[in-house]
Amino acid sequence: MEMKTGAHTVHNLYYHIVWVPKYRRGILAGKVGERAEQVIRHVAEEYGYTVDTLDVSPDHIHLLLSLPPKLSIADAVRTLKSITARTLFQEFPELKRHLWRDSLWADGYCANTIGGLNLDAVRQYIQNEQEHTP
């Protein structure tokens, strides 16, 4: 199990995160989904998150993310969701036709912590998720 180091820490903190567009609309297909993935990766790099595995399906996003201990999962998800929404609305204004009140994402999200023994299983699940999505 690979450990990361900080100024005064040694850590291995992984989160499996899932979030969906408002009304679980299948709006993340094609170029929109590709751009969402680019934005997520860019935001992660800018904010010090590590994207381990990412799958953008038409109606949801699966992300295996590693964070340093000084960052909260709530702040990371809020940052990822807000910046992707703003960017996607700017670049694909037609998305607003499919949604209500200019919100791209549903309010909530699912986050699970992942221990070292389960890390490969979660990676495999996310990588195979696209194959099982209708």
Image (cartoon, rainbow, N blue to C red):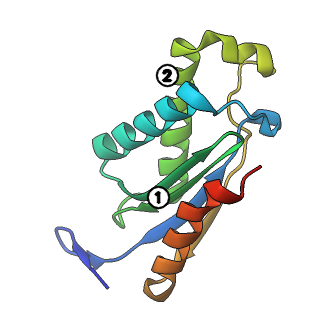
Q: Secondary structure at mark 2?
A: helix
In this rendering, the answer to whether 115 lies above or below 108 is below
Residue of label 2 = 87
Is 112 situated left or right of 132 in this image? left
In this rendering, the answer to whether 118 lies above or below 78 is below
Residue of label 1 = 72
Q: Amino acid at mark 1?
A: Ser
Q: CA distance from mark 2 to mark 1?
A: 23 Å
- The quadrant in which residue 85 appears is top right
User: Which residue corresponds to the image point at 68% horizontal and 52% vertical from the top-left?
Assistant: 109
Q: Nearer the viewer, mark 2 or mark 1?
A: 2
User: Which residue corresponds to the image point at 40% horizontal and 58% vertical from the top-left?
Assistant: 71
User: Which residue corresponds to the image point at 47% horizontal and 78% vertical from the top-left?
Assistant: 119
Q: Earlier in the sequence, mark 2 or mark 1?
A: 1
Give the residue furthest to the left: 7
Q: Callout 1: few (<14), some (14-19), or many (20+) C-alpha neighbours within 10 Å?
A: few
Is 64 situated left or right of 10 in this image? right
Give the residue furthest to the bottom: 117
User: Which residue corresponds to the image point at 74% horizontal and 35% vertical from the top-left?
Assistant: 26
In this rendering, the answer to whether 32 lies above or below 78 is above
In this rendering, the answer to whether 47 lies above or below 93 is below
Image location of residue 24, percent across then percent down: 79, 40
Is 48 situated left or right of 28 in this image? left
Image location of residue 66, percent across then percent down: 39, 64
Image location of residue 18, percent across then percent down: 63, 55
Q: Secondary structure at mark 1?
A: loop
In this view of the protein, which residue sits in the foreground, 79 or 38?
38
Image quadrant holding the N terminus, namely bottom left
Q: Amino acid at mark 2?
A: Thr
- The quadrant in which residue 102 appears is top right
